[in-house]
Image (cartoon, rainbow, N blue to C red):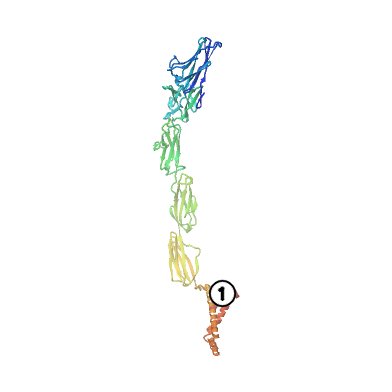
């Protein structure tokens, strides 16, 4: 036994045959021996003599082989009890070996070649004991290369009336001749007239190997666009049959369009006026066909720069309608089509009534409307100064005031298509006499004499009112602010208070007059910083008392030293001084004591607060 890969290579005994001559020699050989190319083959030849008591002393054994291409035989070996000779100048010189044994001889052939597939004869001659001959057929096997499959490079039309070539499969260098079987989706294909044809081409090389090429012709249908085709090669090996399968291939099937679909590719969602719209058409034919587009309401075809897309840009409401596309490869052009409804939505500009601007009298009512024609449901909201003041297409303004004046904007939107929106506006002007801003008709103020006070007056009205001032009690005044906008006049005057002032702001226009009064009471200038200076005054008084104490100590010291005479006349002088011009000094002492008493009393006695001390001090000053 010899192994090669997964294949078990062996000399196989197929059948035994017995040959006898004159009933004296019996010879046994295998009918067939099988072997792989390049291996060694062994052919046994067994014999025995029927007369066991009379074994011959001389036995001659010869091996023969049939000549290539004819039935003639040629000896390749001769042997007897004394010698073993391999014949020269044969195909087996140097390649064979004969092993003798008791009642058996074995022929071994090394490096078996394809031409070794022939019959080998074994001849046994026992002279008087008899002779016999037998033969064995040697079979040689060489597995082919793996099969190679190749599909047709172009598409195959299902409209062909006869089977079309689908693929070819080739198995090379095998011996004996291999066979090829075709499969579709793993199911073997058998020849069927008008549907499946298999063409076989067998080539034998000079080396003896066989190559087999098989061509599959198949009548394809639309369902074969997803089918997988493959081929399988089968070949003989010693004692068995092996198979090898090729790769599978998919073929391209051409078939006409039988169904078409048309849809809106862009934009996503609803379509509005001004959009660029792309309509794509797709059919089930192969190869994908070109299409012709048209609109149901029109008799002419629509031009398209693309084989399967129709572009409409920019669209308007007039482009709404049913669109169709038809393939050019359809068997029934009129019946095979795709269609869709295209709706182009719109929103017209808002129309506001009253238009532009509207005059209304103070206290009147007004109803404004806003409408915009649209293909979808709309929502209307009214705004003034950025704040929402109403909903719906109607705005009611009741009992108009000057605050009613302004621009009213209606915003129209489409909830289902936010990109659609428009707006309109109306300017409301409320006409009437002046109206001064503020609830007070008379303003009362108090200001210190010499100070300046600002009086402000703001008036609404249409026509725009003018403001004039009438000031009594001060000649020193001037207007410092004068501003005018669409609805309001604003004036500010600066008045210097020298006495009580009476002022009036007069706002007037063609519709009437309004007055606002101001009354300014002049007050005395307060003792500025009196409360804050009490502490300073107390500190000054204390320092004065300390200085008097120091002065008294100095005088007493000088008196003790005799620096100051202290006689009777001196005392009289001092007394005189007290009764004349020194009364001030005595009075100061008295007042100083009183002030000191006041201070001490405030600190230790009644525990009066700073405000009480100020009031007490003011009372003393007034006394």
Q: Nearer the viewer, residue 491 or 581?
A: 581
- Residue 434, x across and y down, in percent: 46, 62
Q: Specify whether 217 is left or right of 564.
A: left
The C terminus lies in quadrant: bottom right
Outermost residue, front side: 82
Q: On the image, numbered disc 1 is attached to which residue?
A: 613
Towards the viewer: 99 or 424:
99
User: Helix, strand, or loop for circle 1?
Assistant: helix
Residue 279 in the image: state x and y as whole percent: 43, 39
Q: Up-down: is 7 above or below 461?
A: above
| Badge 1 density bin: few <14, some 14–19, many ≥20, Cα 10 Å | some
Is any part of residue 353 visible from this angle?
Answer: no
Numbered circles on residues, count: 1
Q: Nearer the viewer, residue 602 or 305?
A: 602
| Foreground pick, 196 / 266 | 196
Give percent across and percent down for residue 264.
45, 39
* Above or below, comparing residue 220 to residue 451 in the picture: above
* Extreme-right residue of the structure: 605
Residue 497 at x, y percent in the picture: 47, 71
Task: Mark yes or no: residue 542 visible.
Answer: yes
């Amino acid at each position: 036994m010899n192994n090669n890969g997964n294949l078990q290579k062996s000399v196989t005994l197929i059948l035994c045959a017995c040959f006898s001559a004159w009933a004296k020699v019996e010879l046994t050989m295998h009918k067939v021996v099988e072997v792989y190319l390049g291996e060694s083959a062994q052919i046994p030849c067994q014999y025995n003599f029927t007369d066991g008591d009379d074994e011959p002393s001389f036995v001659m054994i010869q091996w023969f082989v049939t000549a290539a291409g004819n039935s003639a035989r040629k000896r390749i070996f001769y042997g007897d009890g004394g010698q073993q000779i391999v014949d020269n100048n044969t195909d087996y010189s140097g390649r064979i070996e004969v092993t003798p044994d008791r009642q058996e001889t074995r022929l071994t052939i090394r490096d078996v070649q394809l031409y070794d597939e022939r019959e080998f004869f074994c001849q046994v001659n026992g002279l008087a004991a008899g002779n016999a001959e037998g033969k064995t057929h040697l079979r040689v096997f060489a597995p082919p290369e793996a099969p190679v499959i190749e599909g047709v490079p172009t598409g195959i039309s299902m409209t062909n009336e006869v089977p079309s070539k689908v693929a070819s499969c080739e198995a090379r260098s095998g011996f004996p001749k291999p066979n090829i079987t075709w499969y579709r989706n793993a199911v073997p294909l058998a020849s069927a007239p008008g549907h499946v044809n298999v063409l076989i081409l067998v080539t034998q090389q000079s080396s003896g190997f066989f190559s087999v090429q098989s061509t599959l012709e198949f009548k394809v249908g639309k369902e074969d666009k997803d089918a997988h085709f493959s081929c399988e090669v089968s070949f003989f090996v010693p004692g068995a049959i092996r198979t090898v399968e090729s790769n599978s291939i998919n073929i391209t099937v051409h078939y006409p369009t039988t169904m078409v679909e048309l849809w809106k590719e862009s934009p996503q969602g609803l379509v509005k006026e001004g959009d660029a719209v792309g309509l794509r058409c797709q059919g089930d034919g192969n190869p994908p066909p070109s299409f012709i587009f048209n609109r149901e309401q029109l008799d002419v075809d629509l031009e398209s720069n693309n084989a399967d897309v129709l572009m409409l840009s920019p669209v308007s409401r007039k482009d709404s309608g049913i669109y169709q596309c038809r393939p050019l490869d359809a068997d029934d052009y009129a019946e095979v089509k795709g269609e869709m409804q295209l709706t182009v939505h719109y929103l017209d500009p808002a129309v506001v009534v009253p238009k532009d601007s509207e005059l209304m009298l103070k206290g009147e009512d007004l109803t404004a409307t806003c409408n915009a024609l649209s293909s979808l449901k709309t929502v209307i909201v009214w705004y003034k100064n950025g704040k929402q003041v109403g909903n719906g297409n109607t705005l009611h303004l009741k009992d108009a005031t000057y605050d009613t004046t302004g621009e009213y904007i209606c915003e129209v939107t489409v909830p289902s298509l936010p990109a659609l929106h428009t707006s309109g506006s109306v300017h409301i002007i409320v006409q009437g006499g002046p109206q001064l801003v503020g609830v007070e008709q008379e303003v009362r103020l108090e200001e210190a004499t010499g100070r300046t006070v600002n009086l402000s007056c703001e008036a609404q009205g249409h026509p725009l009112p003018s403001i004039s001032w009438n000031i009594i009690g001060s000649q020193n005044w001037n207007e410092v602010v004068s501003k005018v906008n669409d609805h309001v006049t604003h004036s500010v005057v600066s008045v210097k208070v020298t006495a009580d002032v009476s002022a009036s702001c007069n706002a007037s226009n063609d519709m009437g007059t309004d007055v606002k009064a101001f009354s300014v009471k002049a007050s005395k200038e307060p003792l500025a910083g009196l409360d804050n200076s009490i502490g300073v005054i107390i500190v000054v008084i204390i320092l004065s008392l300390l200085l008097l104490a120091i002065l008294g100590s100095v005088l007493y010291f000088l008196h003790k030293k005799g620096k100051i005479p202290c006689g009777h006349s001196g005392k009289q002088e001092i007394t005189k001084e007290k009764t004349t011009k020194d009364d001030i000094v005595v009075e100061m002492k008295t007042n100083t004591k009183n002030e000191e008493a006041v201070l001490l009393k405030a600190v230790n006695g009644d525990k009066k607060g700073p405000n009480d001390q100020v009031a007490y001090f003011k009372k003393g000053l007034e006394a």
